[in-house]
Amino acid sequence: MSTSPLVKFPALSQVCLKCIRCESTFDTAQNLYTCEKCGDLLDVSYEWNSRLVSDYRKLFDTRRASANPLDISGVWRFRELLPFYTSESQIVTMFEGNTAMFDAPRSAQYAGLRQLRLKHQGLNPTGSFKDNGMTTGTTQANRMRARAVACASTGNTSASMAAYAARAGMKGIVFIPGGQIAYGKLSQSMDYGAVTLQIDGDFDAAMSIVQEIARETDIYLLNSINPFRLEGQKTIAFEMLQQLQWQVPDRVVLPGGNLGNSSAIGKGLKEMYSLGVIDRLPKITIIQAEGASPLAQYWSSPSGTPFKSVEKATTLATAIKIGNPVSWAKAIRALEWTNGTCISVSEQEIADAKAMIGRDGIGCEPASATTVAGIRKMVAAGQMDPDEVVVGILTGNVLKDPDYTIQYHLGELYQKSERRTEIVKADSPLHSTFANQPIQVAADKKEIYKVLEHILAEEHNN
Amino acid sequence: MSTSPLVKFPALSQVCLKCIRCESTFDTAQNLYTCEKCGDLLDVSYEWNSRLVSDYRKLFDTRRASANPLDISGVWRFRELLPFYTSESQIVTMFEGNTAMFDAPRSAQYAGLRQLRLKHQGLNPTGSFKDNGMTTGTTQANRMRARAVACASTGNTSASMAAYAARAGMKGIVFIPGGQIAYGKLSQSMDYGAVTLQIDGDFDAAMSIVQEIARETDIYLLNSINPFRLEGQKTIAFEMLQQLQWQVPDRVVLPGGNLGNSSAIGKGLKEMYSLGVIDRLPKITIIQAEGASPLAQYWSSPSGTPFKSVEKATTLATAIKIGNPVSWAKAIRALEWTNGTCISVSEQEIADAKAMIGRDGIGCEPASATTVAGIRKMVAAGQMDPDEVVVGILTGNVLKDPDYTIQYHLGELYQKSERRTEIVKADSPLHSTFANQPIQVAADKKEIYKVLEHILAEEHNN
């Protein structure tokens, strides 16, 4: 088994935290999440030495056959582009990334594309793309000699943080709002030994308290405001390019909630471009749910209109039910860098697209299905060419929300039912267009054959 | 990107179906699931030409860097050892396998081992090891030009079959028993477009009808009696060995339910040994749940005692709640070949072991946790040496049964609760030994700091 060639990392002085607005710079060893001067978001910023590696593609490709844990990881395989740590011993990995990229012929046909590939980040160790970012976030926590890591989250973030904290041998602390606990979403962080603190008040209160605590103590904050998480998430683009044998697609389409993923992928693509690893940029195309679409609204508004949060976000795609996305400014930058765009899709479009992705044998969270829904909408509107080479990023595992799937196929998704009490309003009536309900049959072979003939004839006609 | 060297497969005449009892042989193109003469199980049996490949390890290692879909698959990467298909175009793959092997230090300490590795088949595309076998089963269905594929299942098998049927462009038909449907376990097969037929009667009735239909029609049966599924599952051992850089461990420990996995891994190891890829065999160690432990009972009974099914299997580890395992005879053979063993563990041991695996940041189905529980029991009884090199196989994703995790940590697992109505009897009182309940705190920083100090001091003392 070949080991990777040794690569000399730039000295730490060539890495800094840089404010995306006022461009103030700070030491990466500072316990800092936003700019000390203007309060805006920070980037982990590098001064690249382009002569460091003669052939990045070859280096990264060779590592795929290596048995070194850092080479096996779909994040750290690209570690020359993540040179913020000071020793490999700080790295916390669960072999994240390495996710499959599927050809999705039925989804492609449904969306109106000649071909469509779906890269599935829900196949990560804890079932979502968050793992791509937690591996770098926890590594930075290690480097900072943090006493514990913390986040406010009731979903994928808490699951991922808890697992990586366990890996790092650190305590993970999850802050959740008061009221009734939705245990389904907490099962993983409980399993991985994180402490759950339920704080009197709403989600914003929990978030505000955990941020204060992170400022005042050596407990390290791993919410998506943390710029080191985005360093790991940017490698989703790297791995996608590697899987495409470094042929740059025309578009990368991804769901937009907190907008950290779009921001990270934009940053990563720009870095690869500036280092000459790729010679053009794919258009980043962000799809939001209509009820939680502040960026789509901003993007279609007249020039000069300021970015505005959505007061009360509504969508059954809980992973992107966010009205005030943390990384909106970074996402706008990513769209500008790559000549990208942002649109929104309806609950109906999301639900039907998810069913169609399922027909390709690929399960995903509802939020992930915005990709296929968005592509379909853009192709229909003439905003996307059927011949474009497109990769959609699926962000979460289908098992994160089995109820949604069940209710869709039983035709109960948008009705008040025992199985789901939350209702999302829609302007037009909603249907389970591709419902797939169980069929009851007597234990009689003749009856069963009759049903089977009917089903298989139908299949033949499709 | 290097392509794989061309390998000439043995002509089909060198492959047959062979009865494990009377050794009758049949053509692999026959629609056959059991021996036509004596009714016992069939093996896919090969006459190896050992000069076919000069260095298997090198061939398989080189492929890890390849972009060929068959090389990316953790099953088909080893295709020289699966030469039952007649054309690569028959192969249906979702890049199954390629699952992480984690170091599990807390579980090792808990079990009394110096080191323990856990290979996680729950990170497969549909969340269980079944994908390893469905890729080969569906490939054979393709080769047979089956009109559809079918199985009787309410769990992981139906999810996996449905996904691979979708990939193959075939209809998948899932037979389930009458009565109330547990939709949670059906969400994936509904999503992937399989037809669910609910047949009046119990599970055995559904199984018996689907077997009859498979015999009478061109609908191909993909339950675990199908010998082609085991061909894929045997590669779990191959990939494990590859990840260990071909150093053979002392033991492979895995859960025992239907016993197909143990059977397959035994067959695969023996084949690798006979081809000279490895020079010794690890002991296969099967762990069953006490309430569903026919093999453990047989294994500890006096010589000459016949194998006996368990009338009514009980365990909360639903994936191994099987009293009459299909592959028992093949599993016994695997234990004999590898000088292995089989024991059972209690519900309490399973639950606590699962929590301990969680503390390593690794989530799994309850059934998977029998591995760590069994190792602990054997080390304590002096049947396993603390210095042994051991790999445990985790078979299912934690998200397949979030309720179990939640109830354990809330201390509700073995009590009648709103969340779980099924109760498993235990002889002794049961405890959530490592319960991890949420802590309620007022939105007051002083209060929160008090709680945090307490938690972190506790952590320090552990």
Image (cartoon, coloured by chain):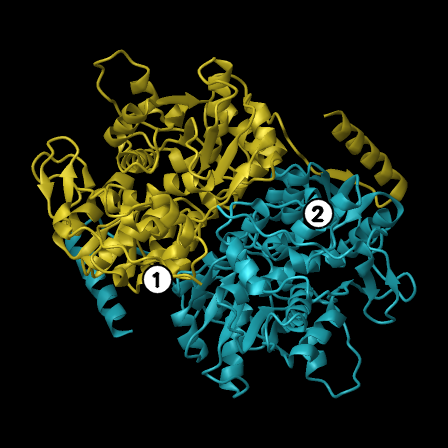
Chain colours: A yellow, B cyan
Q: Residue at x 11, y 48 (%)?
A: A27
Tell me if label 2 and label 1 are in contact, CB under 8 Å.
Answer: no
The residue sitting at the right extreme is B37
Quadrant in the picture for residue A253: top left
| Secondary structure type for disc 2 | helix
Graded by Cα atoms within 10 Å as few (under 14), some (14 to 19) or many (20 or more), the crowding at tag 1 reads many
Q: Is residue B428 left or right of residue B207?
A: left
| Secondary structure type for disc 1 | helix
Q: What distance separates the C-alpha of mark 2 from that of mark 1? A: 37 Å
Residue A203 place in picture, x, y as percent: 29, 41
Q: Is residue B402 visible?
A: yes
Q: Is residue B193 left or right of residue A237?
A: right
Determine which residue is flagged by label 1.
A167
Q: Is residue A376 above or below residue A436?
A: above
Q: Is residue B212 left or right of residue A187?
A: right
Q: Is residue A159 above or below residue A392?
A: below
Q: Chain of mark 1?
A: A
Instruction: Point out which mark residue B250 bears.
Output: none
The three-letter code of the residue at mark 1 reads: Arg
The three-letter code of the residue at mark 2 reads: Thr
Graded by Cα atoms within 10 Å as few (under 14), some (14 to 19) or many (20 or more), the crowding at tag 2 reads many
Residue A7 place in picture, x, y as percent: 27, 55
Q: A96 and B80: which one is in front?
A: B80
Residue B305 place in picture, x, y as percent: 79, 83
Tag nearer the camera, 2 or 1: 2
